[in-house]
């Protein structure tokens, strides 16, 4: 059997871990963002295995409630012909008539 | 043999043999109608595998994958009506599939994709809140014997191949480019977990892997950390706990004799 860690070492690590976990996730994972209204018909993302997939289910180009993962910051630069702002959006929106 | 099992067997048989006793409502040939039904059964199961194992498919191409999946469907039809979880044993089947020996990492990529599907469908559990964690720090003496409970979605895969990097390369737009940077023969351990509604996959070192496996086996916090340090001198407990807390998978704490979560 290996030597267990002491209570003090565990407490310090747990305290540090809380600080680590509290720092914004942005730096670690979020180089991507969900972008609504930019996917072409049937090309939206989202996949979780057989029977649950909503990927590739969008019915029209630039559907307002379908999203794609795009590099962070690029979403609101991407043209969307259905979006009221003319660009992709970070939340779903109701399409304007093209 | 009952007519039902004869029917089921005929669906998966190598040759189309119309089970006896079938009749059609409009007098068309039962054999032809049965062949259509049989084809739909097998193709829909192959489609289900393609949905659950997208990277496995990309690695070998659609044609190879569907031929492989067809044989698996015949050999191991679903045992449960829950199609979403179909694919148990697919990795083992790939391992034994002679034509796939040229892609030695294929089975482990499939194994990891199955874990991903399982993590997605695993039960929910609330993560400990920062307040609850802070309260634990109020009684450090109780920590070594505490049992940390992980979220039911947490899964590990130790592979002699770079499963996580291979998988990650296929998530990018330019998979070919990203793949060129991956050395498949680099061993990796995959940590699969569901953070609220997103399944996250990351490669972790031997220390955190040992730590998480011990916790999953119910080993006490102090002992689990000690095992991890013994397995990997560079083990950073704070970073590992940070990974679990940030992933939302530190789901509870139990103390011997009493429970608390």
Image (cartoon, coloured by chain):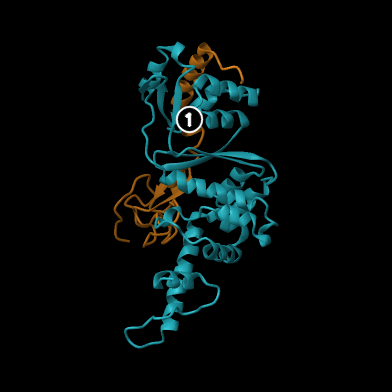
Residue B12 on image: x %, y %:
50, 69
Chain letter of the cyan region: B
Residue B234 on image: x %, y %:
64, 23
In the image, taking residue A64 as reference, residue B65 lies left or right, namely: right
- In depth, the one of A94 and A4 nearer the eye is A4
Q: Secondary structure at mark 1?
A: helix
Residue B13 on image: x %, y %:
52, 72
- In depth, the one of A33 and B112 nearer the eye is B112
Which residue is painted at 44% across and 78% down in the image? Answer: B19
The C terminus of chain A lies in quadrant: bottom left
- Relative to residue B121, is residue A56 depicted above or below? below
- Relative to residue B142, is residue B179 depicted above or below? below
Which residue is painted at 55% across and 46% down in the image? Answer: B112
Q: Colour of chain A?
A: orange
Q: Residue furthest bottom?
A: B27
- The local crowd at label 1, few if under 14, some if 14 to 19, many if 20 or more residues have their Cα within 10 Å, is many
In the image, taking residue B210 as reference, residue B137 lies left or right, namely: left
Report whether residue B170 is seen. no
In the image, taking residue A36 as reference, residue B157 lies left or right, namely: right
Residue under pointer 1: B244
Residue B26 on image: x %, y %:
32, 86
The N terminus of chain A lies in quadrant: top right
């Amino acid at each position: 059997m290996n030597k267990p860690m002491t209570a003090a070492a565990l407490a310090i690590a747990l305290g540090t871990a809380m600080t680590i976990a509290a720092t914004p996730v942005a730096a670690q994972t979020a180089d991507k963002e969900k972008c609504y209204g930019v996917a072409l018909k049937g090309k939206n993302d989202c996949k979780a295995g057989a029977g649950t997939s909503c990927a590739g289910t969008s019915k029209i180009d630039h559907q307002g409630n379908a999203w794609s993962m795009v590099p962070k910051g690029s979403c609101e630069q991407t043209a969307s012909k259905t979006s009221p702002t003319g660009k992709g959006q970070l939340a779903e929106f109701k399409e304007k008539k093209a | 043999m009952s007519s039902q099992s004869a029917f089921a067997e005929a669906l998966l048989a190598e040759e189309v043999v119309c089970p006896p006793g079938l009749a059609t409502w409009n007098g068309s040939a039962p054999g032809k109608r049965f062949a259509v039904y049989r084809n739909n059964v097998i193709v829909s199961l192959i489609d289900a595998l393609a949905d659950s194992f997208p990277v496995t498919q990309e690695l070998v191409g659609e044609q190879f994958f569907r031929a492989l999946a067809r044989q698996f469907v015949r050999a191991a039809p679903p045992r449960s009506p829950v199609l979403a979880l179909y694919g148990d044993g697919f990795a083992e089947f790939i391992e034994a599939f002679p034509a796939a020996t040229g892609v030695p990492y294929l089975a482990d990529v499939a194994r990891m994709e199955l874990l991903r599907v399982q993590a997605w469908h695993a039960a929910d559990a609330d993560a400990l809140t920062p307040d609850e964690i802070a309260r634990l720090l109020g009684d450090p003496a109780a920590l070594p014997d505490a049992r940390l409970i992980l979220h039911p979605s947490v899964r590990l895969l130790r592979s002699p191949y770079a499963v996580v990097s291979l998988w990650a390369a296929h998530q990018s737009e330019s998979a070919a480019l990203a793949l060129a940077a991956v050395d498949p023969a680099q061993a990796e351990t995959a940590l699969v977990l569901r953070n609220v509604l997103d399944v996250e996959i990351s490669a972790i070192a031997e220390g955190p892997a040992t730590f998480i496996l011990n916790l999953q086996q119910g080993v006490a916090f102090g002992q689990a950390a000690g095992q991890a340090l013994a397995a990997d001198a560079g083990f950073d407990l704070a970073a590992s706990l940070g990974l679990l807390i940030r992933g939302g998978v530190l789901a509870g704490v139990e103390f011997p004799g009493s429970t608390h979560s």
